[in-house]
Amino acid sequence: MTGMTEHTDLILDGTKLAWHLDRVRAWERGERIAPITIDMALTRACNYACHFCYAMLQENDRRTIDRKVIFDFLEDCADIGVRGISFVSDGESTIAPTFTDACVRGAELGLSMACGTNGFVFNRRKLEEVLPSLTYLRINISAGERARYAEIMGVREDWFDRVVQNIRDMVAIKRERGLGVTIGLQMVLMPQYADQILPLARLGKELRPDYLVIKHCSDDEDGSLGVDYAKYAELEGTLREAEAMSDGEYSVQVKWSKIKAEGKRSYQRCYGPPFMLQISGSGLVAPCGMLFNERYKKFHIGNIVERRFKEIWESDDYWRVMNYLASPDFNAQKMCGSLCLQHKVNEMLDGYRKGHLTLVDPTGPEPQHVDFV
Amino acid sequence: MQGSVIDYDALTAAYRQSLTSVLRGFRPGGFEEPFLATWVPDEDDAKALDGMFEAAAAAKVERVAVRVGPATLARVTPGRVEAVASRHGVVTTRSEGDTLVVEVALDGRATQRDARAAERVAAATPRRSAAGPPVPDASERASHYDAAIRAAAPYTHEGPPPAELMALGGATRVAVEHQGAALEMWIDGGGNIVAARHHGGEGDVPAVLDLLCRVVGSQPLREAADHGAARLELSLRGRGGARVVPGIVSPANADPRIGACAVSLRALLAAYAGAAGPVAIKNEFVPALGARWANAAPPAREALAREALRVAAEALSLGPDGVALATIAGDTRVVVDFAGDVPRDRRPLLLLQLERSLKTQLDDAVTVYVEEMADRNRIRRLVPKPSTAGTP
């Protein structure tokens, strides 16, 4: 077993860690490594109220990330060797006043920049400004029909129309200007949204983004969102039917590995966060989005509004927490919510540590979005 | 709505406040013009105003009036405000006290925005490699474990297993050569280690193997192979002990003596698989609770936890009321409250330190948390409605 998923151009259900083996080897030697990818938000606020929102479970003290804070942060990231910054995490970054400037500044510093968003506040002018700076732009959309969209995403029905138009515009701008940005749609699927799988896949086929990815819904270790993981199995036929709508330019991909895992992890130690860190829209630096809530305060390392990120990364607090997660005192099967952003990275590193797989420098072209592991 | 004047300064202040006070269903506070749902301010007030007129025009609003206060006018001149507004329609302005009211009859004229970002090419910034303190050399790292290894005597797992264990029968014996010594294990039909023994070897080898046998004894062999060496490392260093590398400690990078244990444990697993058949990769092992904690009823556990917290707080100079038990969730999750005067930035480390102490005093499985902070928005629960387009 190589531990690497099939090499496709766009790896949406796997990890690209194999293309960063220099950093894995440094980690193995016990060196302090910079994260390859940092996922963060510019605010915890969101203009939507999605039924499936995991961020609702991760409340913590909030600060304002202003222009100086985010610019300092991006500068520090470039300085220590971070490669990709995604604005996803626990808030809607496009409603933050600093959003466009942050994307542009990050790109200027040589960072790969990306965003996951509901897409509502965009207009053509804003898209023209921001798309050239992005590696990918992913729209969160868990329905393909107006009424259900409004119900699931917690907004008015006419907001669906605006988002659909914005998707048309971003696809058009990409084509007209020959931009490299990948435009994607993401469906967070709870079993009760099954009726929207095919309508959304059809909508995507009409709108022509590069992909539609369908993923499971994360829940905390107490099951607060009420996700019934056992019910995903009933959806396999419909999900396959959605994937069959793929064509040469539009790919529908299901994150099968996470859906079939039924929320369970094969590993107990958490090795992923040093490679793939998450920061809350409050500025809180924690290993991951599952540990943002105040209840997990022992994992909270600092806040970029109060302290430069580079200092936080260099601190003993940071490495103490990372070591705790990698130690026998931590059990991801018992202490974490269901499958996280770092899951595929964890699987690979855990398999490697246990001797189940070997690390081999990959040959051939790099996959897309290689800085987003 | 089109007759009202939008107070730009109040709106932007409310917007910024709402970014940290409203979690879900965010709207600029206190204003009801629907087009403002699509507007995002900018730290550059001229851009922010431009965006506001643009949002109004996109929403087919015919007229919009905006009041700009003195604080904003200190940053952007009235002339600039008027110039920005005039991109979107016919502008009239008037002063009202120290504010400027700008009215725009929006006429849908296209605004060619400065395409600075669209044309900008990312600067070719050299990618810096990660840097940090150097990893100490192997002998320095090993020196952290010497004292604990040398304190292993008297050995408890040397030589053949006790006769009563051998009399049970049914166990599979596996053995490997480990740095001149022999490491043997007897595994029952369920894959659990019933005996772990060593003999031979020179120098530190017997001590290391004895300590390893103590750590992994009675665990599943799978668990021993997966995590046994790491458990050994942690037991030698101690939870509060200094880490021997600046990054993430592992058996391999901590000390070659510990790294060799990881290799031998995997070899034992492979030998067992060869003798008894494949061993499932899945590992969900959780160590059993200690008898005292396992057998204590909830009131007794709470009493034990309170006393342990008192002892831990004293050792950490927290004061008698610095930390209190809130609740015990499940078997292992001790939830605490800090007194208000405990500095917030100290609390993460204090929680880890409290946990270390409680693991020692109560049970190795105990973990420490603080109370959950609840979302200010109620978690939505949908009643599924069938799609009118038909269901799969």
Image (cartoon, helix red, strand yellow):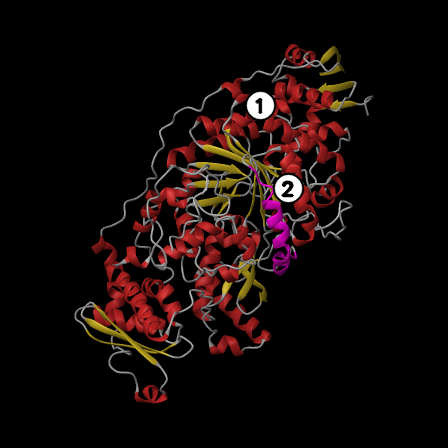
Q: Is residue B96 visible?
A: no
Residue A213 percent location from the top left of the image: 57, 43
Chain designation of label 1: A
- The span shown in magenta is A226-247
Magenta part, dominant SS: helix
The nearer-to-camera label among 1 and 2 is 2
Can you identify the residue that label 2 sits on? A201
The answer to whether tags 1 and 2 share a subunit is yes
Can you identify the residue that label 1 sits on? A128
Left or right: residue A363 compared with residue A228: left
The three-letter amino acid code for the residue at tag 1 is Glu
Instruction: Give whichever of A191, A288 is nearer the camera.
Output: A191
Instruction: Give whichever of B276, A318 is nearer the camera.
Output: B276
- Location of the C terminus of chain A by quadrant is top left
Residue A244: within the magenta?
Answer: yes
Residue at horizontal 58 percent and vertical 23 percent from the top: A128
Q: Callout 2: 10 Å neighbours few (<14), some, many (20+)?
A: many
Residue at horizontal 41 percent and vertical 79 percent from the top: B189
Q: Does A254 appear above or below B155?
A: above
Residue B93 percent location from the top left of the image: 74, 11
Q: Which structural element holds mark 2?
A: helix
Q: Quadrant of residue A95?
A: top right
Instruction: Give whichever of A170, B40 is nearer the camera.
Output: A170
